[in-house]
Each structure stands twice: as structure tokens, then as C-alpha cells.
Amino acid sequence: MNIYLCPSPELYPLYHRPGAIVIIVDIFRASTTMVTALAHGARSILPVATTEEAEEQGKDLGCLIAAERNVMKCPFAQLGNDPAEYAEALVSGQDIVFTTTNGTRALNIAAEHGAEEILVGAFINLSATLRYCHTQGKDVLILAAGWKGQLALEDTLYAGAFAFLAEQATIGKASDDGTLILRDLWQAKAQSLEDRITYIQHSEHYARLVQAGFSSAVPLCMTLDTTSIIARMQGARLLPIDSQP
């Protein structure tokens, strides 16, 4: 299994690989939040591009609306983009219309450019996602959602972790320069949760979360393997697949 990294949705047309599984990663916080919702029993997530779509679709479908722009929850939505909001009592059995600043945009770009299979990845389901990709026998392209077209450290670091663990298990390898660099960064700086949190405090998006009062999301988003749920796009919706080891 060859593992590649696309560091920004704007660059996706240059990195698209026919037949590869595309993993959308927005660690702070959309992909972590979507995986958390599915792990807590949400039936499906419908990612949409705009806040207008989210409000309209949520009303038409009679489902929960989750909407965030520039870190903050939109006024019309029941939920924002913080994984701590998605308690099992609230989301279990529910369909959720979901839009965020970066993560849902990355999903849409991958779909528009012909990605054949799209997963949503987070540190909290990293090993389950890795196992699933290995069983499919395909290459993997990790699409980092970033922040408004710019690289985000936490998203690219996921690619390093994915490649490092794949190589440790002898089931895959870092196959481009970006993934090689991030694999080595993960090994040197981020293998423990304490090290990851210390290192990520230098990042731009960490500063945004702190300024907005969401620093408590950081440990949740940086913790490995709290769920075995795979988040996979099927048609227009993100659905859960349980992947027990």
C-alpha cells in the first residue's frame, strides 16, 4: 500500500490518483467531530458546502443541523464543530446535515474530481482506518483539509502517523516526499499524546482554538484510537462501518 499526501484541497487536482482511497483529514475539528458523531450512534452525516444549504436541507429533511464558520457555531444550527457536543444521547439514531469551514469543502473537492472511495479520518480512528485500507488492497491518498487553502500542521501530521504505523506493521509505506517528511516528524515529535499536544501548541490552528475558547478540544482531537468506526462516503452521505480488530 503506497501512501501519499495532498497538503491542501486547492492542490487536489495535481495529486488525484485514480483508484486510490482518499482519506479526508480535518483534525481540528471536522473529521474528529464527524467520526465522533458516528461512533456515538449517528445514522448518517450529509456534508454540504454552504451554510444556506445546511439550514435549508436540515429543515426539509427534519434532521439535526451542524454548522460552523471560522471556528464558531452558526446561529441557526443545533450543533457546531466541537466533538464534545456530540453526546450519544443527542445524536444516536439521528441524521445530521453538516457544514464546516474546511472539512466539508475538502470532501466536496475530492468527490468533484472523481475520487472513487472517500473516507473521513481522524486520530481517534486511525488504526481502524489503516486496517480497512489494507484490506482493500489499494493505495491511499490523504487529503489534508488545512485552513482556507493553507497547510495545517495537525492534518499533515496525520499522514505521518498513518505512514509510520503502516510501516511498523509492514503493510504500507510513505511514497512521496511530503509523507516521508511527516513520517519522520511523527516519529521524532509526536508518538505520545503529551508530545503531540506540546508540539501542536506551535500551530496556527491551535492558536485559533484557544482564542475562541475551544482549547479543551485539543486532547480529544489528538488522542489515538478511541473508536473502531470507519467513516465512509456512500453516495452523498457519510456512513459508519464498524471495524473491530
Image: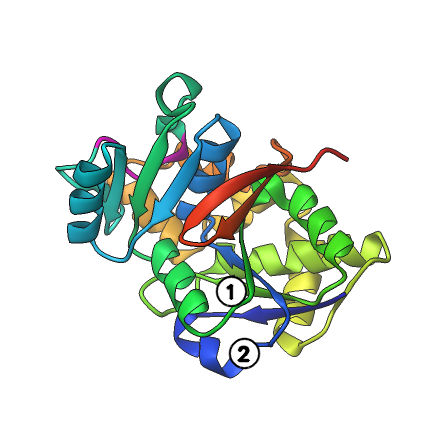
Q: Secondary structure at mark 1?
A: strand
Q: Residue furthest right?
A: 170
> Taking the image as drawn, is residue 186 in sight?
no
* Horizontal side, residue 47 vs residue 114: left or right: left
Q: What residue is drawn where x is 25% and y is 43%?
A: 67
- State if disc 1 and disc 2 touch (CB < 8 Å): yes
Q: Name the residue type under label 2.
A: Tyr
Q: Name the residue type under label 1.
A: Leu
Return the x and y of residue 45 as percentages of the image width and height. Answer: 39, 41
Q: What residue is drawn where x is 38% and y is 55%?
A: 103
The crowding category of the residue bearing disc 2, from other C-alpha atoms within 10 Å (few below 14, some 14 to 19, many at least 20), is: some
* Horizontal side, residue 75 vs residue 224: left or right: left
Q: Residue furthest bottom?
A: 14
* Horizontal side, residue 184 vs residue 156: left or right: right
Q: Which residue position holds label 2?
A: 15
**Cα–Cα span, label 2 and label 1:** 9 Å
Q: Which residues are magenta?
A: 78-83
Image quadrant of residue 123?
Answer: top right
- Going from N to C along the chain, the mark reached first, 2 or 1, is 2
Quadrant of image for the N terminus: bottom right
Q: Main secondary structure of the magenta part?
A: loop
> Taking the image as drawn, is residue 170 in sight?
yes
Residue 141, above or below 241: below
* Horizontal side, residue 38 vs residue 214: left or right: right
Return the x and y of residue 115 as percentages of the image width and height. Answer: 52, 68
Return the x and y of residue 110 as percentages of the image width and height. Answer: 45, 67
Front-lying residue, 203 or 40: 40
Q: Which residue position holds label 1?
A: 143
